[in-house]
Amino acid sequence: MTIDTMREVLGWCSVINIGFLLWWFVVFMFAHDWIYRFHGKWFKLSVGQFDSIHYAGMAFYKIVIFVFNVVPYIALCIVG
């Protein structure tokens, strides 16, 4: 696999993952109550706990995207 191919793959992975993160955020913002009621059937969580879990999940996912997709993409752009 060439550097150009790896750079292209990482670029598309970054775009797809950032798109998924934005989708998660938008759905969470506009359908918060519905998602809370849906998950409330299975788990006994307060609204604060529910929000904290989603916020932490989004933060973790964003860090993973940057560490495994964006930073290697930038490094390959600098090298190649």
Image (spheres, helix red, strand yellow):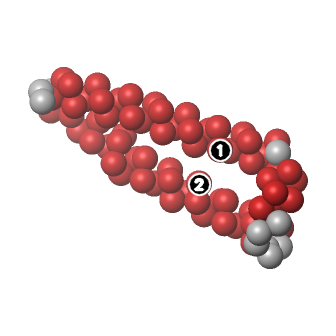
Which quarter of the picture shows residue 40?
bottom right
Q: Position of residue 80 (x, y in %)?
A: 15, 27
- Foreground: 31 or 22? 31
**Could you tell me the amino acid type at mark 2?**
Met
Which quarter of the picture shows residue 6?
top left
Give the residue displayed 18% in from the left and 23% down from the top.
4
Q: Secondary structure at mark 2?
A: helix
The residue beneath circle 1 is: 24
Q: Left or right: where does residue 80 sit relative to residue 38?
A: left
Q: Left or right: where does residue 15 sit relative to residue 34?
A: left
Res 60 seen here: yes
Query: Against 14, is 28 above or below?
Result: below
- Foreground: 68 or 41? 41
Q: Residues within 10 Å of mark 1 (few under 14, many from 20)?
A: few
Q: Left or right: where does residue 38 sit relative to residue 21?
A: right
Residue lying at the far bottom of the rendered structure: 44
Q: Secondary structure at mark 1?
A: helix
Q: Position of residue 65 (x, y in %)?
A: 43, 47
Give the residue displayed 46% in from the left and 31% down from the top.
15
Q: Residues within 10 Å of mark 2 (few under 14, many from 20)?
A: some
Q: Position of residue 1 (x, y in %)?
A: 12, 30
Query: Against 48, is 38 above or below?
Result: above
Q: Give the label on residue 8, or none.
A: none
Which quarter of the picture shows residue 52?
bottom right
Marks 2 and 1, the one that precedes in the sequence: 1
Q: Are marks 2 and 1 in contact (CB under 8 Å)?
A: yes
Query: Against 50, is 14 above or below?
Result: above
The residue beneath circle 2 is: 58
Question: Could you give the CA–CA distance between mark 2 and mark 1, rounded to whole angstroms?
Answer: 8 Å
Residue lying at the far front of the rendered structure: 42
